Image (spheres, rainbow, N blue to C red):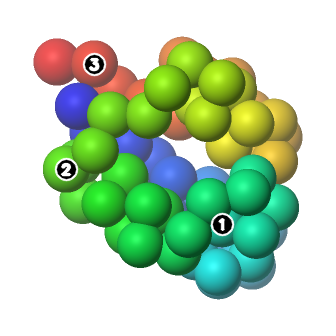
Amino acid sequence: MKTRIKEFRAKYDMTQEDLAREVGVRRETIVFLEKGKYNPSLKLAHDIAKSLKTTIDDLFIFD
């Protein structure tokens, strides 16, 4: 799975730490998500999409 988290973070001038704090996870979780090494729970995907003002479908690309 690929993500556009980094792209959306840049759009809102957010660091990985900022996003992690906002959705209640460690920064490392955001790093792993951006590298495609971690598949988030539906709740985490929803929380990230909400924080980045987008939809899950726009944020995550399922191969």
Which is more foreground, mark 1 or mark 3? 1
Q: Mark 1 points at which residue?
A: 20
Image coordinates of residue 49 in percent, x first then y, are: 70, 36
- Contact between marks 2 and 3 (CB within 8 A): the answer is no
Q: In this view, does 20 lie to the left or right of 52?
A: left
The amino acid type of the residue labelled 1 equals Ala
As helix, strand or loop, the secondary structure at mark 3 comes to: loop
Dividing the picture into quarters, in which one does residue 12 lie?
Answer: bottom right
**Quarter of the figure that contains the N terminus:** top left
Using a 10 Å C-alpha cutoff, classify the residue at mark 1 as few (fewer than 14 neighbours), some (14 to 19) or many (20 or more): some
Q: Distance between the Cα atoms at labels 1 and 3?
A: 22 Å
The amino acid type of the residue labelled 3 equals Phe
Image coordinates of residue 18 in percent, x first then y, are: 74, 77
The amino acid type of the residue labelled 2 equals Lys
Which is more foreground, mark 2 or mark 3? 2
Q: Which mark is residue 37?
A: 2
Of callouts 1 and 3, which one flags the residue occurring earlier in the amino acid sequence? 1
- Contact between marks 2 and 1 (CB within 8 A): the answer is no
Image coordinates of residue 29 in percent, x first then y, are: 44, 61
The residue that appears at 16% across and 18% down in the rendered structure is 63
Q: Distance between the Cα atoms at labels 2 and 1?
A: 16 Å
The residue that appears at 19% across and 50% down in the rendered structure is 37
Using a 10 Å C-alpha cutoff, classify the residue at mark 2 as few (fewer than 14 neighbours), some (14 to 19) or many (20 or more): few
As helix, strand or loop, the secondary structure at mark 1 comes to: helix
Of callouts 2 and 1, which one flags the residue occurring earlier in the amino acid sequence? 1
The residue that appears at 44% across and 34% down in the rendered structure is 40
- Contact between marks 1 and 3 (CB within 8 A): the answer is no
User: Is any part of residue 9 visible from this angle?
Assistant: no
As helix, strand or loop, the secondary structure at mark 2 comes to: loop
Q: Distance between the Cα atoms at labels 2 and 3?
A: 13 Å
Q: Residue 62 carries which label?
A: 3
